[in-house]
């Protein structure tokens, strides 16, 4: 019985870290975040990034634990491939003392208004 309880609690903790949405961050495009003085970090895989912008720090989530010290302290804007990658990246950077204040998902692009997404191809 104890093993089942421990296994269930571990599963719930892992599911929470990956799938429960992170609060207090807003969706905006990277150029708008750069105008506000935020450091833009792309945590997608290297082969998923199609534009090579020199203003963006490219550190995939898998390498974030090793290279987070290269990120300047201050306000951070994240570009992620999907929600799971975003949740994991935001939680990791907040744990390391960064202020993640905005994000952009590469899978969905914003329409006209804030918070409204256009899903699909």
Image: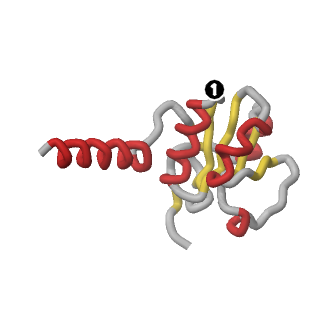
Q: In which quarter of the image is the N terminus?
A: top left
State left or right for residue 23 relative to residue 12.
right
Specify the quadrant of the image occupied by residue 12: top left
Numbered-mark total: 1
Q: Mark 1 points at which residue?
A: 97
Where is residue 103? Give x, y as percent.
Answer: 61, 43
State left or right for residue 70 relative to residue 66.
right
10 or 21: nearer the eye?
Answer: 10
Residue positioned 54% across, 53% down in the render:
85
Residue positioned 63% across, 26% down in the render:
97
Where is residue 61? Give x, y as percent.
Answer: 63, 52
Q: Is mark 1 on a helix, strand or loop?
A: loop
Q: Looking at the image, what colour scheme do you see?
A: secondary structure
- The relative height of residue 111 versus residue 10 in the rendered view (above or below) is below
- The relative height of residue 11 versus residue 109 in the rendered view (above or below) is above
Residue positioned 71% across, 39% down in the render:
68
State left or right for residue 18 relative to residue 30.
left
Residue positioned 75% across, 27% down in the render:
73
Crowdedness of circle 1 by 10 Å Cα count: few (<14), some, many (20+)? few
Q: In which quarter of the image is the C terminus?
A: bottom right
């Amino acid at each position: 019985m104890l093993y089942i309880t421990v296994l269930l609690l571990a599963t719930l903790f892992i599911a929470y870290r990956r799938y429960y949405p992170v609060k207090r961050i807003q969706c905006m495009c990277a150029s708008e975040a750069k105008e506000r003085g935020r450091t833009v970090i792309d945590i997608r895989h290297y082969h998923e990034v199609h534009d090579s912008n020199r203003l963006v720090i490219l550190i995939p989530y898998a390498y974030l634990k090793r290279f987070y010290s290269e990120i300047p302290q201050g306000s951070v804007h994240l570009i992620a491939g999907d929600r799971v990658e975003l949740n994991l990246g935001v939680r990791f950077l907040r744990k390391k003392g960064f202020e993640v204040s905005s994000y952009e998902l590469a899978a969905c692009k914003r329409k006209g208004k804030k918070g409204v997404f256009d899903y699909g191809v």
